[in-house]
Image (cartoon, helix red, strand yellow):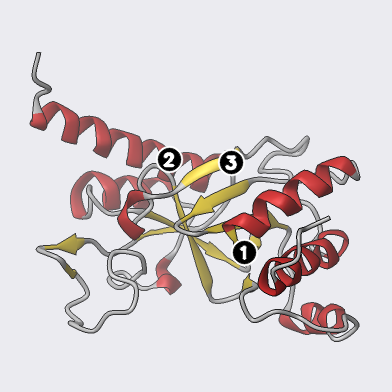
């Protein structure tokens, strides 16, 4: 039996709305619609867009909100097909690294029994979600390390993360570790400090071609 395209599209829109509301209301992460790929080009209108269908545009990232009414309006009326983007820096941040290094780091951190928060699989990368950090504090931690690879990325103030389902970037976004509720509401997130050294080490070993751990 052939699937009804209209029914499939409606289900996809309902899933995006549900994810947007869960992120905004349950997780307390400000969200905003992302751009779309239309006819092979990004809906932002820039023919040379570096990340088509994977960034905020209209509304801008500054409009990200946890207001359920605004979220419903965006994904029910204005942008029902838009990916869900979470603004980082206020209630959630992240560190991302190449996917192979991420798999190894998560396994090693688990062996050390260091508690992990949510983990996102992005195209070619893993993002470990952590409690918000300032760039000053992050810089103080990084300067103590002998070397920091350029392939490690930091999603703090002014940044964003695509969320499933779809999540832009060709729809290749999924939870490796789903968010779990904190005792006082929201989502439990670890501090970045205890994880940072192992994430750097995993990335350094991958970049140098050495077997990790």
Please indicate whether residue 2 sits to the left or right of residue 72 in the image. Answer: left
Q: Residue at x 74, y 76 (%)?
A: 134
Answer with the quarter of the image where residue 59 lies.
Answer: bottom left
User: Circles 1 and 3: CB distance less than 8 Å?
Assistant: no
The residue carrying mark 2 is 19
* Helix, strand or loop status at disc 3: strand
Graded by Cα atoms within 10 Å as few (under 14), some (14 to 19) or many (20 or more), the crowding at tag 3 reads some
**Residue 156 in view (yes/no):** no
Graded by Cα atoms within 10 Å as few (under 14), some (14 to 19) or many (20 or more), the crowding at tag 2 reads some
Q: Position of residue 44 (x, y in %)?
A: 22, 75
> From what the image shows, is residue 43 above or below residue 129?
below
Q: Residue at x 42, y 71 (%)?
A: 61
In space, the residues marked 3 and 2 are separated at their CA atoms by 16 Å
Answer with the quarter of the image where residue 57 lies.
Answer: bottom left
| Badge 1 or badge 2: first in the primary sequence | 2
Q: Residue at x 22, y 47 (%)?
A: 80
- Give the quadrant of the C terminus: bottom right
Residue 176 numbered mark, or none: 3
The front one of 148 and 73 is 148
| Badge 1 or badge 3: first in the primary sequence | 1
In space, the residues marked 1 and 3 are separated at their CA atoms by 13 Å
> From what the image shows, is residue 190 above or below residue 178?
below
| Badge 3 or badge 2: first in the primary sequence | 2
* Helix, strand or loop status at disc 1: strand
The front one of 96 and 90 is 96
* Helix, strand or loop status at disc 2: helix
The residue carrying mark 1 is 96
Q: Residue at x 26, y 36 (%)?
A: 12
> From what the image shows, is residue 152 above or below residue 99?
below
> From what the image shows, is residue 192 above or below residue 153?
above
């Amino acid at each position: 039996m052939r699937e009804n395209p209209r029914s499939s599209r409606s289900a996809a829109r309902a899933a995006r709305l549900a994810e947007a509301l869960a992120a905004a209301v349950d997780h307390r992460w400000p969200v905003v619609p992302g751009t779309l790929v239309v006819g092979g080009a990004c809906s932002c209108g820039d023919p040379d867009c570096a990340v088509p269908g994977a960034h905020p545009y209209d509304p801008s990232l500054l409009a990200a909100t946890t207001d359920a009414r605004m979220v419903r309006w965006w994904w029910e009326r204005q942008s029902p097909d838009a990916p869900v983007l979470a603004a980082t820096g206020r209630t959630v941040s992240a560190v991302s690294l190449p996917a192979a290094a991420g798999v190894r780091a998560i396994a090693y951190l688990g062996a050390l029994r260091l508690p992990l928060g949510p983990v996102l699989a992005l195209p070619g990368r893993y993002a470990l979600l952590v409690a918000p950090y300032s760039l000053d504090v992050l810089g103080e931690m990084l300067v103590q390390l002998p070397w920091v690879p350029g392939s490690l990325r930091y999603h703090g103030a002014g940044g964003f993360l695509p969320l499933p389902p779809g999540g832009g970037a060709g729809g290749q976004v999924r939870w490796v570790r789903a968010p779990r509720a904190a005792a006082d509401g929201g989502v439990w997130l670890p501090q970045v400090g205890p994880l940072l050294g192992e994430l750097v080490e995993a990335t350094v070993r991958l970049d140098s071609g050495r077997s990790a751990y």
